[in-house]
Amino acid sequence: MNPRLRNTVGLGLLIVSVVILARFGAWKAGTLTSAMGRLLEFSRLLLPPRWDVVPALTASMFETIQIAFAGTMLGWVFALPMALLGTRTLFGPASSGFARGVIGALRSIPSILLGVVAVVAFGLGPLAGVFGVALYTVGYLGKLYYEAFESVDTEVLEAVKSVGTTRLQLWRHAVLPEAMPAVISQLLFMFEYNIRASAILGFVGAGGIGYYMLGYVQMLQYRPLTTAILLTFLVVMLVDRLSLWLRQRLLPDWTAAR
Amino acid sequence: MTFTPALAEPAMPLAQPSASPRAVSACALLRASQVSFAYKNGPVVLNGVDLSVSSGGVTMILGRSGSGKTTLLKLFARLLSPVQGAVDAASLPGGKQPVVAYIPQTLGLVRGRTALKNTLAGALSRTGWWRSLLGHFPSDVVRQAHAILERVGLAAKTHEPVACLSGGERQRVAIARALMMRPNLVLADEFVSQLDAVTTREMLDLMRAQTSEGTGFVVTTHDPEIAAEYADRVLIMRNGRVVFEAEAANVSARMLLDRLEEAHPLDDQRRVERSGQGVD
């Protein structure tokens, strides 16, 4: 892109953003300053955190982690075969179109709505959370995986295909091992993401720490809410470090060179 | 066989057809008849190729980039189907089809898996679906894979991931996977193009050793010296046609190089000038 065109596009994007914010009333006199004032007032209510709720919250945080773990694994088990079906280098337009349709539909439904559906099916509690997370995981990992499968080098496919393999053998012995670094690192990322997602799912009654958070908001108890948010932040940080550590151990050295 | 008229007569006095020890005696395994091929919305890659390849010996196909060598190998490997014409396979004793192994230019190895597992992939077509799904090969197949890896000189690196092997070692793994298929014919695309001189010789010697077991090789290359030294039969391709074919015993590297230069359309003008000066 030539520099002149780039500048024009950049300026255009800036103008559009300013206009949209104006339509929403962001530039009205006093809007931003009064918002700041209210936030300051609200943050006085949030602080200091209440530490006496930590034992109860720790138990529910542990439940959230369990929901995220079981949901991620369950979703992963279904995402792999769905992604296999959706791989256009292995399957024709009919089956890959069907699999991509299902994966796309699951991804387009917001995870909180999937949580509501799961609560309807399984009742209030962590089991609903697990299924809500699993459904969302199929939609998300399914797409990442069929893209990883399709990007496998065609010469590897041709070399193994010329042995006279079935499609399933080709997938198991060429596509999957070639895509394995992507499969593992995206699974780890999904687990991290699902910790946050399952905290949110608690808002619709699917168990875990989100259930407490919603309760505190509804009862205007902001100081224990701060404790819950800090705890979630702490766990997300820990899982982030853990998955980095796992990634370094599970993925062979040569993947770094890719 | 039909050839373009320009090549029906030799440009240089040929050596007397001799009873070469490497003479191609085995029967034809695959036959391409009037094969033409073009990729979707692409130019014509092959244009009426007639060619048979046999089970014994080494056939080398010379040609510049874009002459159609790789496409021809893929048609023989049944990875592509001809747009016109046909590729037929001979029926072997017992009504079996010949087994054809294909080694692509970049070898097509699974980098994260060990030499052994890559070799075992060559046995997939005779492995049951649930065994192959679990990745659990029968013990006699595993023994066979170990024996083949030893034969190609990789016994010490059996459990190394391919990504950690050198270029020559990877080449050996690719041969091992092909041999695991118990092939009648191995098709290898630009098989020694990326190797140093010593490793190239080791690979070609390994290949020649296999021909004594009755395996045929079809190898594409752009190196006339290799073709003259290691092939039993040499072909030259140009613009999707086979424009030259000879027993290797009857040609020299120098002559092949001349032929290859002739076979390049951009050099037509130069050739005319050269022959005008009486150099040719």
Image (cartoon, coloured by chain):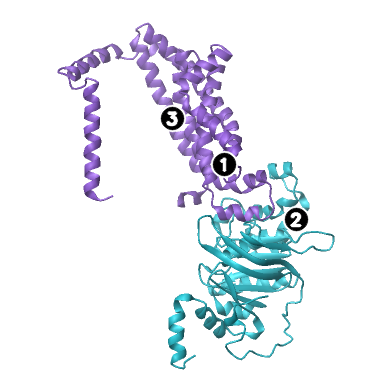
Chain colours: A purple, B cyan
Is residue B28 shown left or right of residue A162?
Answer: right
* Marks 3 & 2, CB-CB < 8 Å contact: no
Check the residue under mark 3 and report the chain it is in: A
Do marks 3 and 2 share a chain? no
**Label 1 crowding class (10 Å Cα cut-off): few <14, some 14-19, many 20+?**
many
Number of numbered discs present?
3
**Looking at the rendered structure, which numbered label has been put on residue B143?**
2
Mark 3–mark 2 Cα distance, whole angstroms, equals 46 Å
Do marks 2 and 1 share a chain? no
Residue A35, given in percent of the width and then of the height, sits at 22, 17
In the rendered image, the quadrant that contains the N terminus of chain B is bottom right
- Residue B159 in view of the camera: no
Residue projecting furthest to the top = A219
Residue wearing tag 1: A87
Callout 2 amino acid: Arg
Residue wearing tag 3: A238
Callout 3 amino acid: Leu
Check the residue under mark 2 and report the chain it is in: B
Give the residue displayed 41% in from the left and 14% down from the top: A213
Residue projecting furthest to the right = B94
Q: Given this view, does label 1 or label 3 mark the residue nearer the observer? A: 1
Mark 2–mark 1 Cα distance, whole angstroms, equals 34 Å
Callout 1 amino acid: Thr
